[in-house]
Image: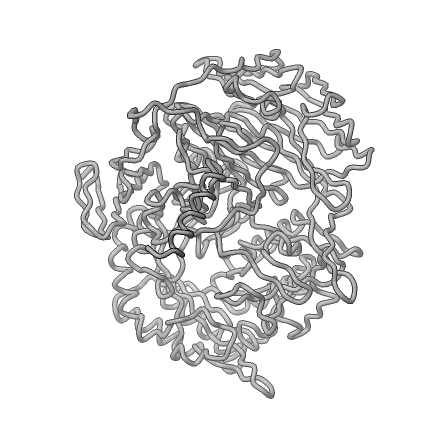
Amino acid sequence: MSIRTKRWIGCVLVIALLLGSRSIYLNAMEGDKANPAVSAANEQASSVEHEAIEPVQSTAPAAPSGQVTATVADVRAASTEGNEQVQIPELTDALVGMKMAENDRFELFVDEKTANVRIVDKQTKREWHGAPPMDKKTPPNNIKFVQAPVHLKYTTGTELSQTYSLQDAENTTAVEAIEGGARATFTFANHGITLSVEYRLTEQGLTVRIPYESILEQGPSRLVSVEVLPFFQAASPWQQGAVFVPDGSGALMRIKAQRAQSFNAYSEFIYGSDPVFLKHSHTQLLPSWRQTVFSKEQIALPVYGIYADGSGFLGIVSQGDHDAKINATPAGIRNIQLYRASAEFIYRNDDIIFIGDNPSEIPLYQGRMIGGDRMLELILLQGEDAHYVGMAKAYREYLIARQGLAPVVHADIPLQIRIFAGVLRYEVLGKTFISMTTFEQVKHIIDAYKARGIDNLEITIEGWSKGGVYGTQPKHFPVESALGGQRGLKELADYASSQGVRLYLKANYVRPFEEEGDFRKNRDAVYGIKKEPQESYNYWLDTRWNDPDELFYLLKPDRVYNNHIAKEIERYKELGIDGVHLQYMGDTLYSDQDPKHPSTREETKKVWIQVMDELRAATGRTAVDYGNAYVLGHVDRIDDIPVDSSHFTYLDEAVPFLQIVLHGYVPYTAEPTNLEDDPRVEFLRKLETGAWPSYELTYEPTSNLQRTMKTDLISSEFANWLEPSIEEYTRIADLYAKIYDQPITGHEILSKWVRRTTYANGISVMVNYHSKPQTADGYTLEPYGYLVLEGGR
């Protein structure tokens, strides 16, 4: 051993001794516990900072050696992972409170000192606590932190601070009875902030509402965000269950006695961050450059929940979802041994601006609060329903009642084909239109599939308007003449109809490229906090820095409808197409900080819904990407639905929560098969989640797209993908014909590698994500294989 090596080892030992138990483990989901469908976990940190108020200690009470129990009750696991048995410490007394309301099912108790809640099921006597009992050895400040039902963040200028209702002796809390519940008014005396929270019992649980008019700012502080009941039904490490977050398709944070220590917690914006506030979606910001965050899934559904030991709840953000976050925190952070989840309502966003010749970075908050009431609806679950599948069923029923979600009615299972028609190539002088698929060539594609016996096709054409995909949008007419023009598109629509093929046109009314067509940024684009049109770049995949040659903007929502949709609806009707795919409206939501014409994300959401409804009425169908919750009940198909989670280090595994909610009600497709990294794994994900396969194709060779902005089509030539697409479609067509209209009623993680999805008619699908045969529940599955079971066989 060399002297240099010995010195290096000595330094490592010294550093290890100094750090002790404070070392941070960055292995994604504790190494081998990652989702088996993913070859490598995404080692990216959460966007939220650790609440460094109390020192972080060990993550759980000491566990007796050698005592191991099975994994959480919902998992029929053949794996060896499990919770270590721990001794339950002496606990603090539960907050009892005074009875403030009752109905046929529940009683509501509110503690007069803290204004926290306790709910009791009158029949089963099961209780749900806003502040659960804790280890008596917990520091007093942390006990107050847990028992405080209101946590808020505020600013006095440029920095963000946080407090809670029981932190300062000067704070006051007043509780009064109202119809069906209680109102608690909280005054943060040192900050001059007052707000009220209203609790009301429902037949399913509890609503928690913050009336906007109750918020007063009478001091130096300005309200930034509020969490209400952040520890509702929080779980202890000795319990068995999980915290559910709606990350991508859905993800679980398993409740464990021992967990790798983390200083990060889950905290993500519902529907993704507002893109006009650059700080929320970038890791580095410079005056002329910006680096975006690592690729991750976003939250499509405004829900969260916890289940443990036979009880749980589903939280639904029913008002204010457009300006809110979902938070989830593992035990150990802030030396609090509780797993918790909550919604955080945002009242002011912040960003960074640069000032001066040698630009200085200046943080800046919104001056005016984002208006509107905020409300949570807590659906209380117990028994078999206290599980992520039970949560998904409860949310499905909520959508049926509130948003008109309805079962699918068409019985055919179409092969989804997306056609890329054309794009502009910018030359040294001028630009050239690159035709990739003419309307006549689309007919040839239809004929080729029909000749092979594929009668059910659904085709969506992108880049059909003048200039192609980055041409004159948001203006979509006239139709590109090089593709066949208006007459050629009308003939294609008629031909598709005669062949029983549904034809969609993809339209971009949200993100125009620079100042093409009649778009003008100062007039038409949304503004950021620095009161200038906010740029929206594309980014280089390898470095994540913005590409200065690919500059886009986001269109003001009112101009989307008044200046474009209203003028073009009749043109779509004249073509005789079957539907319009509205790009960006299913996965992008933003505000406008233009001081002359400001608008909120809620107002943008309303415009998107209006557009979906009117184009649906005019053409028959609408489709979107990803599928944020506000589109449900307004679209007929969702493309590129997330079938996985972001794999943050503190989340243990992905689950198909989104698909359990939607299957049998809204058809959805996975990302195109010809663009997948590992078709074997992705095929199994489709089977596990019930997603339809899709393909994004061109008639001309993919190489023709060189030196254009269309860089994501790696292999798209129709001639190369005709046979593979038919093979995949025929492999699952019979199965999907039996389950297309069936809700998912069960999902099980049978082992580390094997999962089973069950439908209402009794059909279940088992998949094996391992490269070796696996046996689970008495069945043996081949490597990367699957089984379809009908009637239990």
Residue 56 at x, y = what percent?
A: 53, 33
Residue 236 at x, y = what percent?
A: 45, 25
Residue placed most toward the observer, 556 or 8: 8
Please tell me which residue is depicted at 40% across the width and 24% down the height of the picture: 62
When the figure is inspected, residue 414 is found, relative to residue 72, above or below; the finding is below
**Image quadrant where residue 85 sits:** top left
**Left or right: 297 in relation to 598:** left
Say if residue 655 shows up in the picture.
Answer: no
Count of residue discs = 0
Residue 261 at x, y = what percent?
A: 46, 37
On-image quarter of the C terminus: top left
**Left or right: 199 in relation to 580:** right
Say if residue 98 shows up in the picture.
Answer: yes
Please tell me which residue is depicted at 47% across the width and 80% down the height of the picture: 435
User: Which residue ends up furthest to the front in the rendered image?
Assistant: 3
When the figure is inspected, residue 38 is found, relative to residue 209, above or below; the finding is below
**Left or right: 698 in relation to 70:** right
Display colour scheme: one colour
**Left or right: 157 in relation to 28:** right
Please tell me which residue is depicted at 65% across the width and 31% down the height of the picture: 151
Residue placed most toward the observer, 141 or 15: 15
Residue placed most toward the observer, 106 or 406: 106
On-image quarter of the N terminus: bottom left
User: Which residue ends up furthest to the bottom in the rendered image?
Assistant: 429
Residue placed most toward the observer, 138 or 386: 138
Residue 189 at x, y = what percent?
A: 78, 27
When the figure is inspected, residue 28 is found, relative to residue 394, above or below; the finding is below
Please tell me which residue is depicted at 51% across the width and 20% down the height of the picture: 134
